[in-house]
Amino acid sequence: MKPRFAFSISATDGAARAGVIAMQRGEIRTPAFMPVGTAATVKAMRPAEVRAAGADIILGNTYHLMLRPTAERMARFGGLHKFMGWDRPILTDSGGYQVMSLSALTKQSEEGVAFKSHLDGSRHMLTPERSMEIQRLLGSDIVMAFDECPPAGVDARRAEASMERSMRWAARSRAGFDAGEEHAARSALFGIQQGSLDEKLRARSAATLIDIGFDGYAIGGLAVGEGQAAMFGVLDFAPAQLPADRPRYLMGVGKPDDLVGAVARGVDMFDCVLPTRSGRNGQAFTWDGPLNIRNAKFADDQEPLDASCGCPVCTIWSRGYLHHLVRAGEMLGAMLMTQHNIHFYQDLMQAMRDAITTGRFAAFRSDFAARYRRA
Amino acid sequence: MKPRFAFSISATDGAARAGVIAMQRGEIRTPAFMPVGTAATVKAMRPAEVRAAGADIILGNTYHLMLRPTAERMARFGGLHKFMGWDRPILTDSGGYQVMSLSALTKQSEEGVAFKSHLDGSRHMLTPERSMEIQRLLGSDIVMAFDECPPAGVDARRAEASMERSMRWAARSRAGFDAGEEHAARSALFGIQQGSLDEKLRARSAATLIDIGFDGYAIGGLAVGEGQAAMFGVLDFAPAQLPADRPRYLMGVGKPDDLVGAVARGVDMFDCVLPTRSGRNGQAFTWDGPLNIRNAKFADDQEPLDASCGCPVCTIWSRGYLHHLVRAGEMLGAMLMTQHNIHFYQDLMQAMRDAITTGRFAAFRSDFAARYRRA
């Protein structure tokens, strides 16, 4: 019988870890990158194409899905997996971050967040309990605790108050999730560490979460504008504050060089809209760094996006063709650029898993840094 | 060795014919529907998906391609097939129709059409000779003669003058094509019958084209706003004016019921943007008629677009999911709606080929008409 949630680390190399999370709907190889499927679709990609790129798990957004098509409708369709045609694990966020960044007229209280939909102005309330209910209705495999994510640069007092509220919400999330019975018996719940850039606050947050007990632990409140140096500064201490035998998930990260630096510091899971959003905007990721395919210099370029890439796009089409498609506003341009980027991110994760497994992660990291030119 | 161009009719049923055109790049089963790949892409579809839907041949547009990415650039890439990754036959139009409908400040003369690009205002000239050169640079398999397509409702005098100019241009197209040597030795040239709705003008046009001699004959100047009844009126006599042993191609047509009525009247080939454009606009074709997936009644509909359709979309996704995607403006919505429509059109052609081959086309046509509700 498949386990509900079992994380095994098969190799470590410095702080970096390679392993597998076994769940009812399949295995997740770590370090893992989760493509973002905001509105029940990884934009411009069919599920089979996402899987063929190497993804073991995708992410869905509670905030978007609760507004459209709504969690209750999704449940009538048999859940998010059946609705969108993806049968492997899905992690759903709690809606806490997006409700603050996307909706209008939010009103926060100890109870939760009241807000108006950015789509039609309708009124809604997100609480830890409602977030757990929505994620259960979606049929999520990895449920995220409902939390508050303060912006970068808040003062120490606000950072502390926000972290403490998130910890109270984490306990309510745990209780709400556990009340889910059948769903709780086949899915997992992750807590989210907060505390801005402050080591002591993050230590207190971690201790509180560990006391409540979760299947995995996310590092929240980063990638909100603090910059890579500050983020790495936190990652120099935050992963070690979390249990070594549980997956560590860095939310909303990031660029390829962010991923390499975070894996080196002990992070196991990531999600980010960058490969999909950049793809739609004409940016392709390569082992030499990102390139903007709209640039006129690519009009006559008969080489693939990345000569060392084995993805279906690089196997068939040239930079010149992609340049033409993107310049002409053709949907196929966004489709192929996205497909390449999703493949590139998965190839990057596979390369890191291989390097950790064979004990040469330091060399991989150094080779990567020498070749990869950040935009 | 594969023939340059060999059309064989394997079955007839009334005026309807089923057959195969054998060419260097593959066989084209007729009656054939050619998906339109305007700008070196069938919009929102990868070539492999177009092929999997059953298409033997696609259409490219000379007017669009000469402006972007330009015929000369395409030639540097090894031609349109290699550029876009489609290795089967491609028919290219001559640019004559689109230059008049899309470009600004056109100036027609006996020589050809001078115009400004709708993209950047640059000045260009299309003549029969230049059109042949462009189609050769693209590496087209079926080249269309350069012609003038008058709008519906022109007076008899203008219809006659326009037809006669098109016939002079047809002779120049033949000479221009034949000068192509290596390309002419492996591709085919079609003439285009004009003459508006007038039987005598069309008879004269056909006789002139036959005298020049072409591999196939298109019926031009229809589907320009005259309506289905007037179009069928012309198709009651036009196909018989053209050689029985050559393919007859009705340009720019059409709706599913147009195709059935035209095949019944002896047409072998079609092209139209309808399945792709409608798909992007949320319209799906089914055996019961078109449906608009944006309609609120589909929000909770768990059935596929067409219960009798075996396409990859109907196999996996519900109307409710497609409704969600299209309403949310998700690219995957346009991708899947287009894919279904392209499959539906190819299934319709296959059903007609089967019906003709088994001598039950009249029954097919009657069953189709009884079930298919036009929008």
Image (tube, coloured by chain):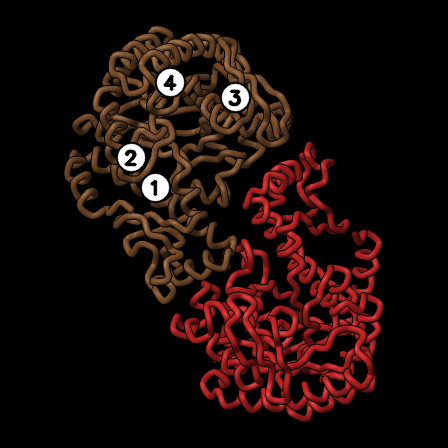
Chain colours: A brown, B red
Q: Earlier in the sequence, mark 2 or mark 3?
A: 3
Give the left or right position of residue B30, taking residue B22 as reference.
right
- Residue B307 placement: quadrant: top right
Q: Are marks 1 and 4 in contact (CB under 8 Å)?
A: no
Q: Earlier in the sequence, mark 1 or mark 2?
A: 2
Farthest bottom residue in view = B211
Query: Which residue has dot 1 on it?
Result: A345
Query: Which residue has dot 4 on it?
Result: A192
Q: Earlier in the sequence, mark 1 or mark 4?
A: 4
In three-dimensional space, the C-alpha distance between marks 2 and 3, rounded to whole angstroms, equals 27 Å
Query: Which residue has dot 2 on it?
Result: A259
Q: Earlier in the sequence, mark 3 or mark 1?
A: 3
Vertical placement of residue A40 versus A153, above or below: below
Query: Which residue has dot 3 on it?
Result: A135
Q: Residue at x 60, y 88 (%)?
A: B111
Q: Amino acid at mark 1?
A: Tyr
Marks 1 & 4 on one chain: yes
